Image (tube, rainbow, N blue to C red):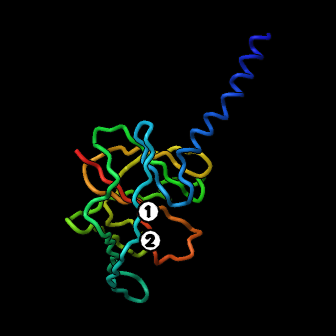
Amino acid sequence: MKKIILSLLACIAIMPLFAQEEAKNEPEFVGQVNLIQGEQVTPLERKYVKTENTEGKSIAGISVKSAKTKIELDGGKSPVRASESDNFHLIVRAPSNEADPITVINIFKLKDSKKKRKAAAELGTFGSNTEGLDLLNYTAKRYGKSSYLITLMEKPAGEYGIIVNNPDSKDKKRVLVSCFGIDL
């Protein structure tokens, strides 16, 4: 009986150490993303998007042709890199980790050139802002206070952006994108 109680107390004493490890890797603020490669934790590059809207057509207030929002980021490549063969994860801080992460986190491919990274999203009839984006599939688990641990299902080489939808955001016109790249 003494051994069982001592084992139980030892487990209880160790549990806060695991919580501290998890909290250490969790980003501090909503919208921030960390790249986890083994023991290495790297905050992703964050850039405000330069957006350009093209008008869609509507008949009687119903959109028949979607409008496009062009996303443009300065710099051809992100300084934050991972390898296609690495076993890496992303930790994304969200307003809460109660929602389905697919509704909160968009991870998408960017077209890159020497000086810019670009993507285009269609704002269609029902206001979807991810149509037209080349989205990556991922799995997610709750992590820490209000984050998600993301594992990409595929890791093709290229430049990527992450947008965290935040309903508490006061400025809907300024979109913050967290960026990283995957190398062969």
Q: Are marks 1 and 2 in contact (CB under 8 Å)?
A: yes
Residue 177: numbered disc: none
Residue at point 50%, 61% (across, down): 31
Residue 175: numbered disc: 2
Residue type at mark 2 is Val
Q: What percent of the width, then of the height, locates residue 86? A: 32, 38
Residue 116 occupies quadrant: bottom left
Name of the residue lying farthest toward the bottom:
60
Residue at point 43%, 49% (across, down): 42
Q: Would you say 103 lies left or right of 184 here?
A: right
In this picture, is 39 found above or below 47?
above
Check the picture and name the quadrant holding the N terminus: top right
Dot 2: element: loop
In this picture, is 121 found above or below 142?
below
Residue 163: numbered disc: 1
**Residue sitting nearer the eye, 138 or 172:** 172
Residue type at mark 1 is Ile
Q: What percent of the width, then of the height, locates residue 35? A: 42, 48
**Residue sitting nearer the eye, 35 or 160:** 35
Residue at point 25%, 49% (across, down): 157
Check the picture and name the quadrant holding the C terminus: top left
Residue at point 30%, 70% (across, down): 74
